[in-house]
Image (spheres, grey):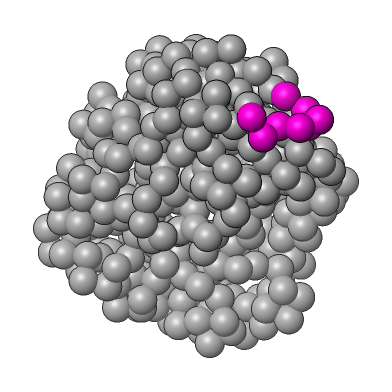
Amino acid sequence: MGSLAVLHASQLVTLTGPKRPRVGTELSSLGIIRAGGMLIRDGQIESVGPSAEIEKDIGDGEIVDAEGRIVMPGFVDAHTHLVFAGNRLDDFERRAQGESYEQIAQACGGIWSTVEKTRAASEADLLAQARKRANWFLRCGTTTVETKSGYGLTVEDELKILRVVRQLQEQVPLQIVPTFLGAHAVPRVMSVQEYVELVIHEMLPRVAAENLAEFCDVFCERGYFEIDQSREILSAAKKHGLKLRGHVDQLTNSGGAKLMAQLDATTADHLEQTDEQGIAALQKAKVQPVLVPGSVYALGLSRYPRAREMIEAGLAVVLATDFNPGSSPTPSMPMVFSLACTQMKMSPAEAITASTINAAYSLNRGHKIGSLEPGKLANFAIFDCEDYRELAYWFGVPQTQSVYVRGECTLKL
Ligand code: NIG
Ligand code: FE
């Protein structure tokens, strides 16, 4: 592969810091090198520093001139639902007319309508749709995503989605971390308890045997899976060696954050309704909160998670898109930055840390990605602006100029 030098960045945003998720004021420390450069060899970062210093070591390697733009680690999106068929345009229009997410779900829209379309789709069709969306993520500057099953809800359909995720990984440069979310909704033909048994005794053993997922997730919510049912499923997943994430306290405060703390989960996601006790429980158990303001915005709701209190309590906050057809149809991390800053009062620097190094740790990949430090993979993006704060400020403007995964240019706009 050889070497590659990136020169003349207005800001090389390195995220250099302790080898663990960042908390408190550490979230504001981006390790910026002005007029920075970076030397890459065989897909890995060899050194970072002032551009003038890097230039001395180039030899006959390739040069990328950033021409005064910012260079940053590619975003790590730690919560997405990428594989599904179709869209939910009808739900979207109904919400605009005043119906709620829950009302639409009860009236045969919602997750269930995507399940029907996803079951009917062939693997090839699902893969083609997912490939297009994977490219959207790259265009927004994202180089790694976690992605979940959850629109199949039968043994074969859940496995089908996870196999599509695996094939997708072979076909696109976007790096993908798979999560099993069989407990996303209850199929209409059975009781909740019957479905919980199916997830535990038939789905989980197959997912584990075929090594199709690293994490298990549950939608813990009124009308979906209650606390006890979520606990049963996640405890079983743990015995199969899966790590845990959870959709908790999104629409109601059911004590989901506390459950994730008790189970020693890696992350607790959503948390719009989580109170001080929930925040304290997450802090004590060192569970990382994954905040997804895109879903609050797109559902037309106003209660965002309490990011400031979480940061002040010492939680290693993560930001993600929650890309999905129902509640958050955006792959754009810069859009999420805008929401984080305007609605949750995070600073642009905190938003960047939450979507790079902290997100990488939440996927057990903090040692490999999420910052521009020697020894890490050369996954980075160049944005057409001079100051990192512009990413959050000019909302709705695509600023990605080029994206690299393992030192290879995957996209140039
Ligand atoms: O994260 N809350 C549950 N799951 C998704 C929504 C999925 C859908 O509506 O299709 C979420 O918001
Ligand atoms: Fe989600």
Q: Is residue 280 magenta?
A: no
Most distant residue in the front direction = 56
**Quadrant in which residue 350 is drawn:** top left
The answer to whether one can see residue 331 in this image is no
Q: Is residue 59 magenta?
A: yes
What residue lies at 25% left-to-right and 65% top-to-bottom? 282
Q: Main secondary structure of the magenta part?
A: loop
Residue 413, horizontal then vertical, whole percent: 69, 15
Viewer-proximal residue among 89 and 324: 324
State which quadrant residue 38 falls in.
Answer: top right
User: In the picture, which quadrant includes the N terminus?
Assistant: top right
Which residue reaches farthest left? Answer: 276
Spot occupied by residue 332 in the image (x, y as percentages of width and height): 52, 29
Q: Image point 26% across, 31% down: which residue?
A: 347
Q: Which residues are magenta?
A: 56-63
Q: Locate residue 186 relative to residue 125 in the image: left or right.
A: left
| Residue 138, horizontal then vertical, whole percent | 65, 32
| Place of residue 180 in the rendered image (x, y in percent of width and height, measured from the top left) | 60, 65
Quick check: 266 above or below 385? below
Residue appearing at x 81%, y 41% in the figure: 2
Residue 11 or residue 294, whichever sits in front: 11
Going 52% across and 13% down the picture, which residue do you hit? Answer: 68
